[in-house]
Image (cartoon, rainbow, N blue to C red):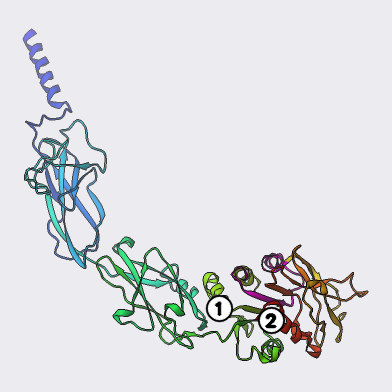
Amino acid sequence: MIVRRTWCFSLLVVLFIGCADEPTSPAQNIRPQTHIAVDTVATEQSSRLKVNWYGDDADGIVNGYLLSTDRKTWVFTRKSDSLFSLRIENNDTSYLFSVSAVDNSLKQYPAEGTSINFNDANSNGYYDNGEEFLTLEGAADLTPAMSRYPIRNTQPHVFFGADSTAISAKQVQLPDTTFTVATFQFGAYDLDGAETIAYFEYALNDTTSTSWRKIPTSQSFITLTSDSGLVSNSDNSFYLRAVDIGALKSKILTYPQEGKSWYVRKPKGNILIIKDHDLPAADNFYQNSLQTVASGKFAGKVDVLDLRTGGKTRNIPPFINPMFIETLKLFKAVIWYSDAGANYRLAQESLPEYIRSGGHALFAADLPNPIPSEVQIALVDFAPLDSVSAFEITSNPLDIKNNSEIVADTSGGTIYSNFIKESGTVNPHALYPKITAKSLYRLPASTKWTGNPVVAVRSEDRRMVFVGLPLYLLNKSQTAELFLQTLMIGEFGL
């Protein structure tokens, strides 16, 4: 009985020792073997490469792997597959992918992504079979599995807009006709990854090899001017392409599209009329008056930008800043006339910067009734106004009759002639100037309203004049024309 118990105890000890989950000593350990799921690849791959691998161990299990794409740098991982983004060095290249299994004979394993050095026995800088991996002695396969992958450089693609959709491209289309400022938004994508795009190139009107100019990838907008090569008073074409780090070029993107035209117009002079109105009588007044005032000084030197014809908003560039603002800066003075449906937000976003840059502006508006809060805010932002009455001065549009005078306010510092109403309906809002602004015109005393409401103001620096009246209806005896003449010559210094 004693012998039997001793034998059973010895057997249990042997079994216990044999089942213990202890690392095998390096001297006894059998190194693992490594395999890549696909040993050879003949078909070119994209630079985003999915690779699978596995290992087996005759006396244990595989606890990790060492990966390399250049046989110089090796990284530890617990994964058995991964998606690699491989750098394209030229049009086509290849990568030798290497993987070495690591078994469970170690007491401690590196963290995921740790770089592992090797004993470079022949000092050639590359791993050669049989060289030991430091800190993993005895546990790593010394004959890593290897497979060469031919990598194809894919062509980048360029587009206009914030993304590659047709909707985005349409949103950034320029008007058919512009002045000598044009802003384009663009981008690119590449199946090899955005980081493989080296730069953009653009050309104007000519795609010969010497015409292309570089744009860095950090830039997604470009504003072109005459100095950039825009040809004035002519149709123009803008060409764009992307070049990747392998020198592979995208297809050339052309603006405008085939069958469309983009005409670039050179300013005739220093005055721009912004037509924000859809009445021929208003158009005729402004355009004809500026041909005759000051003894014809401005004849043939005035340009017109039509924002509204046929009841539709038009000719507004997709980018207010910089394209629209830089367009205004081509002129010393802007005359913006409108009805109740004016593009007040456009004025709000452009006129302050234009005026700060040294420009002069007249904004003449037949204001809506009542004035919406967003229009109130816009007016305060771009005009020398503290506020505007929400409603018209009188409830009866006939209270200001034909031949009525709108009185020039001599406190403004410049002597203007009175306006005399000629026709139509005039019923302005009361304007409340900023504390530094000057009143230019007031309504005469009447039992129909209180006091002498202000209907036109001028900024302290004399660069901005706002008239809350339809001037084309106030031109009896050419009084509105005289106002324009005084404004252009005496106030704006043209």
Q: Quadrant of residue 330?
A: bottom right
Q: Quadrant of residue 471?
A: bottom right
Which residue type does callout 2 highlight?
Met
47 left or right, relative to 352? left
Residue at the spot x=26%, y=54% of the render?
83
The residue closer to the viewer here, 74 or 219, is 219
Residue 138 in the image: state x and y as whole percent.
11, 35
Q: Earlier in the sequence, mark 1 or mark 2?
A: 1
Viewer can see residue 269: yes
The residue closer to the viewer here, 261 or 50, is 261
The residue closer to the viewer here, 416 or 83, is 416
Which residue type does callout 1 highlight?
Leu
The residue closer to the viewer here, 129 or 13, is 129
Question: Which quadrant of the rendered structure holds the N terminus?
Answer: top left
Q: Which residues are magenta?
A: 355-384
Circle 1 is placed at which residue position?
330
Dot 1 lies on which element?
A: loop
